[in-house]
Image (cartoon, grey):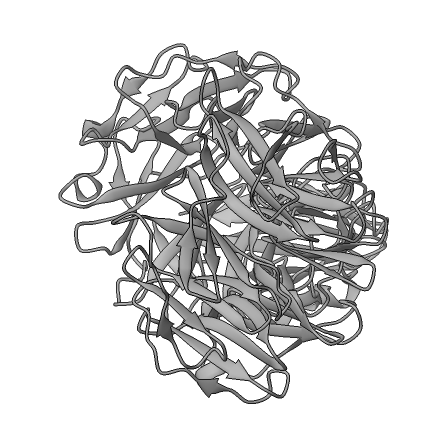
Amino acid sequence: MMPRIFSKKVLLLVCFIASGYSSMAQISNWTQMLNGELEGGDIRSYLYHKGVLYAGARGGIFKTTNKGLQWTYTSNGIGIENSTEINWLTQLNDTLFAATTYGLAKSTDAGVTWTSCTDPGDLRQYIDRVFTLGNSIVVTAKTPGNQWKMFSSADYGKTWTSGSHIFTKRPHVYKVRNDFVIIDRGPDSLYTTTDGLTITHFPTLNLPPGAVLESFAGDTAVTSNYVYAIVDYTGIYRLNLTNGVWEDSVNTIYPRAELYNLYYYNNKLIVCGIDYNPYFKPNMYISYDQGLNWLKLPAPFGVQFPMMQQVVWMGGNDMMAVFYYENFYSSNGGLNWGKRSGGLYASKSTFSLASGNALLTSFSYKGIIRSTDNGLNWNLSNTGIDSPEIFVNDIIKTRDRVYASLKVHLGDTMRLYQSANNGVSWTRCSVPSGIYEFDLIGSNDSTLFIRNRTGSNVFVYRTTNYGQSFENVHSKLPVELTTGVGSVTSIIGARDTLMIQGKDALGYSKIFISTDNAETFTGANTGVPVAVGSEVLKVLPGSFYFLSVCRNFTDSIKYFVNGKWVNAKGQNLPEQPKLFVVDQVGERLFAATNRGVYLSINFGYSWIFVDNGPYGGVSVGKFFATPQYLFVSTQNDGIWRNTLQVGISPEQNPSTTTAVVYPNPAHNTLVIQLPEICTKQAQLTVFDIQGKTAHSETIQPGQREIVLNTSDLMNGLYFFKLNGKNTVVGKIVVQH
């Protein structure tokens, strides 16, 4: 027999159903948070054109007109028609081009708006690089067969010509002259092209046997006679294009350092080196005489990750350099550097939550950041975490604790910290011996569950004493999830009930519930999709219920009641394959889709479109809320905030009030205790979860309590509405 999951505590849903959407206020005017004060921006490419510096990042395209003091987001159209993840930027005349993970985009108005180019090969493809050769645009694109080809367009991306060469791995492309591109695929696979279509082998005369060449650079002028390259990570060689011979005469950096990323700008060569002794720090070198002599530059102060990704020259002695997530500017040719970050934000802040009066989010390589003014300002909040270099994996919340899993240095064993003061300070937990990496897979009011993910010990543990000790509960889990390649995906808590989700050895979704804190489990798989291509994406807890978000051919939302899953119609929701995430704020469900944000106030039975959302195409990780605001935490585009004025609540509609209902769940009768005595005749209507009328009766004046006969109602969740002087609404559960 299925354990009873419904609490007797009276929890009322304040909402209309079915016709209630006519009073809906729309979500609008999203504001992006995390767009200032913090270092960052996972920049893949710089482009300098007509006094404007553009940065192509994982989170989109940014531009600055004041040498990096302030950056503004300029990706309108990228997030809808292409991925916001930018791989490379270039320009042909006054048209800008952006290579994205899902096609090529272009702009003719300095990045204000972007449109999609025709897809090379007539397929939506991953575009890794875009560059110019003469008056043509050339791209490297990955085919559906996971092969790489080059395509050329002479009409700004309208039509394409395919190159004949197929690369089995992603080609590393270096444009060293306006008519000369080098393609690096290892010591025996160096190629050149002058048109992007015809590929020839690259000369290697006079190089050490088996030498590894990478990071080619050269003056883009057609008259340039030299190409430079890092050889075997320690030396710099120069290729004389006149005789095709490599020269070692430029190898004058002593003592030898491990070198990365060579750039040629304004008759200067710049290279970044790594000094591992006594600790991981950057070395920068510059040459003013075509590599014959090198001057060691002071590295940017405070740089955390010393491998330089790219340098761009902006005229005169102005340069901008990016070291992974950190951006630095020099006005004197690299002699001094200052950090430039205003408007650039971390590319990944997916793990976010509200705790007390604070918002907490993981901030890539900076640890935990905290805001107490609804996201306007953020500060690092790592007190108690014993390192300035923190790599956050996840944060999760129980009733009175916040937990964060992280590494304090890249490559370290993962650690677990807990905070009892909403993230102000942290205390390290005692992770079980032998666990080096783990996932925070779920919690309820008092218990945290983690899953080890290293070695063969892929077990689930729980702590009920704030991480002081852990107990291995893997043997107590359902055998379907622990046999063969079966796995636990998540554990969700709602009051005294846990619901565990995972996959069995055949890959089918399985769900179980526990009412004794994971001591025993009972299957809850009636109605769970098992067809090929179907899966349960996630499970959400509610006041009296669980909701599953399913990916299958007919349904996207299912509602758990009376021991089984029943379909919620999902009316008006876009096609399921386009559904990014469904999450809840209180009793309201929000769905982020490729077509915008949708809202349901009747547990997924029907939905209403409320807004295009933040740029429409960002990858949404989670919705979360404070009493005033709705927040969206995204994969690559920071955090977005909106005023929480959706649905119906007593504050928004003063004429709507609630009633006390008992017993709840009800068996054969229940009592509805009204806030005040009925002064005139009123109509009581009871609806099922599909919005259909299940019962209706007239209430005479003078009553304060209504006794409702529920013996004829089927088991399940219902809503009632009493229309009188004021509208009274509530929720009841019938369980015979």
* Relative height, residue 330 to residue 528 (above, below): above
Residue 389 is at least partly visible in this image: yes
In the picture as drawn, the residue positioned furthest to the left comes out as 484
Residue 362 is at least partly visible in this image: no
Which image quadrant for residue 359? top right
Q: Position of residue 239 (x, y in %)?
A: 46, 57
* Relative height, residue 458 to residue 53 (above, below): above
Most foreground residue, 342 or 28: 342
Residue at (64% x, 83% y) in the render: 156
Q: Position of residue 698 (x, y in %)?
A: 70, 61
Total marks shown come to 0
Q: Position of residue 305 (x, y in %)?
A: 55, 32
Q: Position of residue 395 (x, y in %)?
A: 52, 31
Most foreground residue, 485 or 727: 485
Residue at (13% x, 44% y) in the render: 484
Task: Locate the N terminus by quadrant.
Answer: top left
* Relative height, residue 149 to residue 342 (above, below): below
Most foreground residue, 384 or 272: 272
